[in-house]
Image (cartoon, coloured by chain):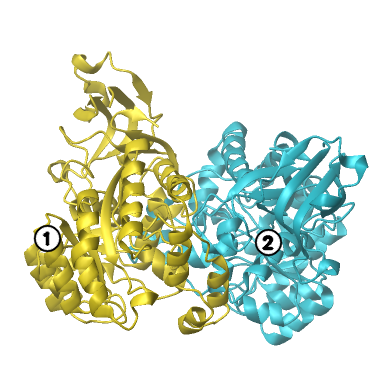
Chain colours: A cyan, B yellow
Amino acid sequence: MADLLITNIGQLVTNDPSRGGILGIVEQAAVAIVEGSIAWLGSKGEVPSDYLDLAIHDAAGAAVVPGFVDAHTHIVFAGDRSGEFARRLAGETYEEVLAAGGGIQSTVTATRAASGGELFDGAAARASRMLASGTTTVEVKSGYGLDVNTEARLLGVATRLDAELSIDVIPTFLGAHVVPAEYRDRRDEYVDLVCTWMLEAAAPLATFCDVFCDEAAFTVDEARRILRAAAERGLGLRVHADQLGRIGAAELAADLGAASADHVDHATDEDLAAMRRSGTVAVLLPGVSFSMRLPYPAGRRVWDSGVTVALATDCNPGTSWIETMPFVIALASLNMGLTPEEALWAATRGSALSLRLDDRGHLVAGAIGDLAVLDAPSYLHLPYRPDADIVAAVVKRGVVI
Amino acid sequence: MADLLITNIGQLVTNDPSRGGILGIVEQAAVAIVEGSIAWLGSKGEVPSDYLDLAIHDAAGAAVVPGFVDAHTHIVFAGDRSGEFARRLAGETYEEVLAAGGGIQSTVTATRAASGGELFDGAAARASRMLASGTTTVEVKSGYGLDVNTEARLLGVATRLDAELSIDVIPTFLGAHVVPAEYRDRRDEYVDLVCTWMLEAAAPLATFCDVFCDEAAFTVDEARRILRAAAERGLGLRVHADQLGRIGAAELAADLGAASADHVDHATDEDLAAMRRSGTVAVLLPGVSFSMRLPYPAGRRVWDSGVTVALATDCNPGTSWIETMPFVIALASLNMGLTPEEALWAATRGSALSLRLDDRGHLVAGAIGDLAVLDAPSYLHLPYRPDADIVAAVVKRGVVI
C-alpha cells in the first residue's frame, strides 16, 4: 500500500461508464493513489494540488488499463504433461492418453507426491509471471489433491501465495474436480467425503467452492449436494458448467445463485436467461480452445444475452498452460466475436464481478490502485500484437512492482 | 565473439541428423564455444579438458535449442495500424479499409515521412525484442519506401541494425512490395524504376531481392523481369508467392532457382515438386493466419512433398505484428499439421537454409555459437506453453546476451 501519482497517461481505461462507452476512456490523464486506493483521476493538466507531492510514475504517453483479474486458474500442481500434449497433437485420443497413464490423474499423482515447498515454488513462479504480465488478482483452485489432507495443503499454498506475493489470490475449493481413481467404483462415497470432512478442512481456507459439473464429471444432483453444503459453510459458489455437453449445470448455477458458471459452451438461451436473472457471471476460457484445437466459446452470444462476461486463462497443466491475460484478450477478440473493448472489460471488470469483488477491475475513486501500464499507445495493441510482452509496468495497491 | 562452456543442459537440440531423429537430441549435454563458434558438444560428463577453463553458463537442467532464425520480416516501418486492425475485426473489408486511407499505403506514407532516427529506433526495439525471445538471425525487408531514396534508407537501417545490435540482420530489397499510389496508372514505369535506379541503389545494401508476386500484386512476368535484374547484380532471390491465389509465382521461384518461396498457400503439387528440385525453401507464415483469421498454411502437405520448410513471423504492421519465434512454433504445431519437432527444425535449420546460411540453425562443430536456453525442461514446452516468455537466456556467438 503506497501513494503514487501516475502522470502522462496517453490513454486511460477506467471502465467507468459515466465517462462514456464501456471502457470510460480518458485521454491525456493522470491517476492519484493514496494508501493503496484511487483518490483521484482525470486530465493530466488538472491534478489537484493535494497530489502533486506524491511519488511520480511517468507513463510516457502510454495506455494504462485496470489490473487484469484472472478468474479461473489451477496453478497449484506438480508434474509436466508436455509429452501427453505432444501425443494429443499427433492424434492420440484422450482415452488413449488416459490408458497410457496420462490425463488429470497423472497430475493428481504428482501433486500428492510433491512437498509443500515444491508446490509453493511452482505456483509462485506461475503467479509471479502472471503478476508481471499485469494480473493483479488471481483466483486459484485446489482440485489436484482429491483427498482431505492434500486439498487442504493446496488451499494452504494458495493462502501462502496471497501472503507472500504482491498479487491478490482468491482461493477456491475444487475437491469435486474429478472422482479420484481409488473411488472410481464408489463415487457416492467420494461425494459424501467432499460434502463432509473435505469441506470441513477446506472451508476455512477458501472463499469459493467449485464443482466440475459436466458429462463424464459430476452430475447435476451431485453438484447440487456439494454446492449446498458449501453454501451452508459460507462459501461462494462457482461451477465448471456444460463445457462438454448440456447437462443443466449452468441452470443449476443460476438456481443456486452462484457467482459464476465457467465455460458454458453448451448453455442454452434459457440457461443464459436464468444466469442473467441470478447475476451469475459467465467465465469464458478461450485458452483451452486454442491449446486443444476446440471450438471457441460463443462470446458474442453470451454477451448479447445480457449475462456479464468474464475472461480467464484456465491455467492448468493439461488443457491450457496459458498464463497471461493479454493473450486471452487477443484470443477473445480474434476468435470469440467480442470487440477488443468488450474483451478488455471482461478481463478486468467482468472478472472482478465474477469474484464478487466490487473494489477492483475499474478505476474509480475508492477502488484499489491496481493497474497495468502498457508498452503501447492504445489498448488495441492487446489483440494487435498478440505475442508481445506488452505490459511495461504493474502497479499493485499503489506500488510499482 | 567469445568463449563459453554451457554445462548442465538437460536436453540439447542439435539438428544434427547423425545424432538421431531430425532434432539430433543429446540428453545431459554440454556445448563448448571458442571464438564464437562451436568447438565441441557432447555428454556433460565428457567435456574435453581443453574446454574446462572456459567461462561457464550453467543451464540448470533446462533445454537448449539452436538460436531461432526468422526468415521473413518487415520490421523497418513507421506508423500504427491498430485502429485498422480493430475495424477489420469488426467486419470491415480490406477494400473498406483502403477506402478509409488504411492498408499498406498508410504505412508507406508514414515511413516516407519518418526520420532515419525514428525508423531505426522503432526497428531496433522490435529487433531487440526478437533477440530477447531467442531469434539470433533475422531477415529484414525494405518495401515501405517504394521510391529510390526511401528504399535505400530502409536498407541502410537494416544494415545499421546488423552493426549496432547483437542480432544478425540479413537485408532484402523489396521495392516490388506494391505499386505505389503515384504509379497506379503507370505500373510499367514503376517496374522499370525498380529494375534500374532502385535496384542500383539497393543492391550494394542487400543480400536478397524479393517480389510480391500474387493476385492484386506483381504479375509473374513483372516478377521475372525484376528478379532477373536482381540476379544479374548478384542478389539472391526470394518470392512472396501464391498467398492469395495460384498465379504461378512458386513455379517462377523454382524456375529462377530462388532461395525461398514464401506463403505458397495456393501452390500446386507440381509447384512444390519444382521447388523441391530447385532447392527452393518454402517459408511458411502462420502468424498472418492467426492475426487475420485466415486458413493456416498446409505445413503437413508442404513438408511431405519433400520441400524444405522454414518458419517466420512475417512481422509487419498490417497483417501480423508478431515478433517471437516460440509463438510461431506453437502456431505451426497446433494449426499447420507439423509436429513440434518439425516446427522447431523449420524455425531454426529450415529458416537458415532459406537464407542460404549453412553455418547456423544447427549445433555442430564449426557452426556459429548461437543458441537459446529455455525456461523449460523440454522443447515440447514451446507449443505446450504458447504464451510463455520461455527463453531464459540467449547466446550469440558465444556471448550471453
Residue at figure coordinates x 78%, y 75% from the top left? A254
Q: Which residue is mark 2?
A: A347
Mark 1 or 2, closer to the camera = 1
Residue at figure coordinates x 48%, y 65% from the top left? A290
Question: Which amino acid is tagged 2?
Answer: Ala
Q: Closer to the camera, B83 or B226?
A: B226
In the rendered image, the vertical position of residue B20 relative to residue A95, given as above or below: above
Would you call the spot at circle 1 few (<14 residues within 10 Å), some (14-19), or many (20 or more)? Answer: some
**Res A236 seen here:** yes
Measure the alpha-carbon separation of dots 1 and 2: 52 Å
In the rendered image, the vertical position of residue B78 relative to residue A254, given as above or below: above
Could you tell me which secondary element the residue under label 1 belongs to?
Answer: helix
Q: Position of residue B282 (x, y in %)?
A: 21, 64
The extreme right residue here reads A50
In the rendered image, the vertical position of residue A167 relative to residue B297, given as above or below: above
Q: Closer to the camera, A213 or A27?
A: A27
In the rendered image, the vertical position of residue A185 relative to residue B379, given as above or below: below
Question: In the rendered structure, the residue with mark 2 lies on which chain?
Answer: A
Q: Is residue A390 left or right of residue B297?
A: right
Question: In the rendered structure, the residue with mark 1 lies on which chain?
Answer: B
Q: Is residue A284 left or right of residue A3?
A: left
Whether labels 1 and 2 belong to a single chain: the reply is no
- Quarter in which the C terminus of chain B is drawn: top left
Q: Position of residue B193 (x, y in %)?
A: 23, 68
**Res A100 seen here:** no
Residue at figure coordinates x 23%, y 28% from the top left? B43
Q: Quadrant of residue B132?
A: top left
- Quarter in which the N terminus of chain B is drawn: top left
Could you tell me which secondary element the residue under label 2 belongs to?
Answer: helix
Q: Which residue is mark 1?
A: B231
